[in-house]
Amino acid sequence: MAQPRLGRPVRGATTGAVSGVVLLLPDGEPESARGPSTVSHAAALPLARSLARAGRAEGLVTHVVRYRGRGWNGPDARLAADARWAADEAVRRYGDVPVCLAGHGMGGRAALHAAGHGAVNAVLALAPWLPEDDVAAQPEPVKQLAGRQVLIVHGTNDARTDPELSYRLAERAKKANRDTCRFEVHTDGHGLRQYQDEVLALAADFVLGSLFTRAYARPVADALAAPPPLGLRMPLAAGFGRRR
């Protein structure tokens, strides 16, 4: 099986010292021995480019992580292990800079699991794939989220991974880490394509506010400050991020 690696760095229009890194973790599959998905990798590129453009003045660089394979594969949790490797590699390349793990689907689960890495300041989980609740199984961990800024975004019409599972995870995470919030994208599906512009704007606002000194937009600040369920069922308004 191939080794994990960072994809080509994506940067904004300016060059110079890197002062922050976003590691994009593509979607995957619960069980698979196949190699990494080129389709999932390509699907992560728009967010990588959008974040790089938004953070060009701060020296933000983004990488889409290339996994060893596309399967989580039970207790192996390979995608989470690859995310931790990517954080190690970011530190090796760029030194002591803040890191955000940003994942979609199974990549969102990997980002949440790998959040305990010492370099990670923020976690962005888009439509995270989560296992069904099972009293006989170990619950998804949340203690590793302490001290991180955490944003979960989920479409209410996601047919691949139940948005209620991410809500229940967010409830548990909020108890371990008050800096947790969750936005709901009404009528959108797993790919969050219907309101893609708003999702990209929300992601940029959260990442730049978490890694640098920018103030969060009012809805993000309110969601982080609000107690459950308000801060965990925050609706993403149509037109979020558009200049008035």
Image (cartoon, grey):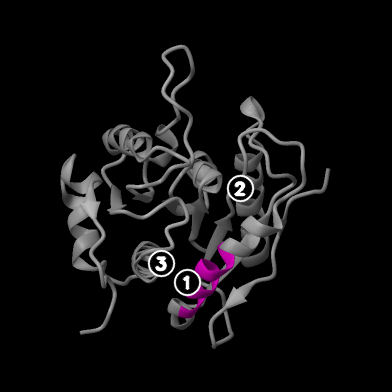
Q: Which quadrant, please, contains the N terminus? A: top right
Q: Is residue 95 visible?
A: no
Residue nearest the viewer, comparing 186 with 99? 186
Identify residue for label 3: 196
Q: Secondary structure at mark 2?
A: helix
Establish if 70 lies above or below 42: above
Q: Which quadrant, please, contains the C terminus? A: bottom left
Mark 3 is surrounded, within 10 Å at the Cα level, by few (under 14), some (14 to 19) or many (20 or more) other residues, namely some
Q: CA distance from mark 1 to mark 3?
A: 13 Å
Q: Position of residue 213 (x, y in %)?
A: 33, 70
Mark 2 or 3, nearer chain start: 2
Under mark 3, the amino acid is Gln
Establish if 128 lies above or below 208: above
Q: CA distance from mark 1 to mark 2?
A: 18 Å
- The answer to whether 1 appears left or right of 11 in the picture is right
Dots 2, 3 in contact, CB < 8 A: no
At x 40% / y 37%, what residue is drawn? Answer: 162
At x 65% / y 71%, what residue is drawn? Answer: 9
Q: Secondary structure at mark 1?
A: helix
Identify residue for label 2: 83
Mark 1 is surrounded, within 10 Å at the Cα level, by few (under 14), some (14 to 19) or many (20 or more) other residues, namely many
Under mark 1, the amino acid is Leu
Give the overall secondary structure of the magenta segment.
helix
Identify residue for label 1: 51
Mark 1 or 2, nearer chain start: 1
Mark 1 vs mark 3, foreground winner is: 3
What is the span of residues highlighted in magenta in the rendered image? 44-53
Q: Position of residue 160 (x, y in %)?
A: 48, 41
